[in-house]
Amino acid sequence: MAAWGERLAGVRGVLLDISGVLYDSGEGGGVPIAGSVEAVARLKRSRLKVRFCTNESQKSRGHLVGLLRHLGYDISEGEVTAPAPAACLILRERGLRPHLLVHDGVRSEFAQVDTSNPNCVVIADAGESFSYQNMNKAFQVLMELENPVLISLGRGRYYKETSGLMLDVGAYTKALEYACGIKAEVVGKPSPEFFKSALQQMGVEAHQAQ
Amino acid sequence: MAAWGERLAGVRGVLLDISGVLYDSGEGGGVPIAGSVEAVARLKRSRLKVRFCTNESQKSRGHLVGLLRHLGYDISEGEVTAPAPAACLILRERGLRPHLLVHDGVRSEFAQVDTSNPNCVVIADAGESFSYQNMNKAFQVLMELENPVLISLGRGRYYKETSGLMLDVGAYTKALEYACGIKAEVVGKPSPEFFKSALQQMGVEAHQAQ
């Protein structure tokens, strides 16, 4: 405990991952990871600020928070930093109109975004929606652009579900990068901008966070 | 013509590609590329040996040849070097039992191969069969192997169909390579072994071929 006390000296806030840290997703909403419900509760009772920073891109924040609350976590939508809303900010700033290769569960996060006559592709963890037809459509949109822009919500290789390992968005992003000869822009971890935005939202400097 | 005569001096054999050279594939069997039916006929009337060397991995050689003959080409199955039969040789030599991520149209080429209790994955241009479920199954097979072996029939980025550009096997191979942290073995062009086997089958040395 002394080592931890030392390590936490000067720390004012904590960023927590969600998938694989708080819970394992899967059929029926997933299962909490042992001890994590109580750990979140203890952090929230402490003097530390707490924020959740996830690369979840298959569910909207509303859906994710509902699911976690059902599992017993004290968490609200405003406490979650996720790649879909971060991407929406970028799209607006740069006047980008995306073709969305995303799961239906996260589509609501893009409700305010103009998707007509697309001039970029946003790819997220689309799960079963990573059909050949959907991948090929995204590929064709990119190939028709003079300056193809591909925005990837995270670039995870795979994640663990209760039923086993599942391919994540990063694998499919690699496929499009290779086919089009381009490099995707990653929104989400491990991008430093993404962590910075989470810290800003928490009101904590990088050196004060764990 | 003088330049061509010079260039062909010492040439004894010609390797011809099929897709995008003889014909563009697509709905209804595809369409021949202008002048190519007659060009093949002229080559066959000449003193040159002719062989067809393709990365086609969605159709069996029998199916492909039937389709080309229907379009007017003078071609037989024994004149075609294709990655699926080349892969079968490798599988047999190395005692590999593949999980097949391939199109149903090419499955017959693997009829003599033991696919029980797989210890490798063979990936080909599976087209619509590149579903998330099928990709994930191949990924899980690889992740369960101590020494994951991924054999890719070609590594093309995309090809042209009459209806537009289509993602090729290379994109999906990249996805599995990235997810598993491995490097695939490529059977097919541009692998030198593949060209060499085509030349051997034609009975011509590399410096005598075009």
Image (cartoon, coloured by chain):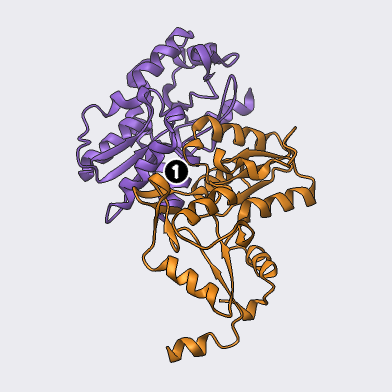
Chain colours: A purple, B orange
Q: Amino acid at mark 1?
A: Thr
Q: Nearer the viewer, residue A47 or A178?
A: A178
Q: Nearer the viewer, residue A116 or A8?
A: A116
The percent coordinates of residue A148 (x first, y second) are: 31, 52
Can you identify the residue that label 1 sits on? Answer: A173
* Image x and y of residue B150, in percent: 65, 46
Which element is circle 1 on? helix
Q: Residues within 10 Å of mark 1 (few under 14, many from 20)?
A: many
Locate residue B69, reporting x and y percent: 50, 56
Above or below B72: residue A11: above
Rendered position, B30 above or below A169: below
Please tell me how many numbered marks the rendered image carries. 1
Could one spot residue A15 in this view of the protein?
Answer: yes
Q: Is residue B184 left or right of residue A18?
A: right
Quadrant housing the C terminus of chain B: bottom right
Could you say which quadrant of the image residue A137 lies in? top left
* Of the pair B194 and A202, the residue shown nearer to us: B194
Answer left or right for A179 relative to A6.
left
Task: Please report, as a chain letter, where disc 1 is located.
Answer: A
* Residue B16, above or below A86: below
Q: Could one spot residue A74 in this view of the protein? A: no
Q: Is residue A42 above or below residue A124?
A: above
Question: Relative to residue A83, is residue A89 drawn left or right?
Answer: left
Residue A88 location, quadrant: top left
* Residue shown at the point (38%, 36%) measured from the top left: A134
User: Residue A97 location, x and y as percent?
Assistant: 23, 40
Residue at 54% across / 72% down in the picture? B44
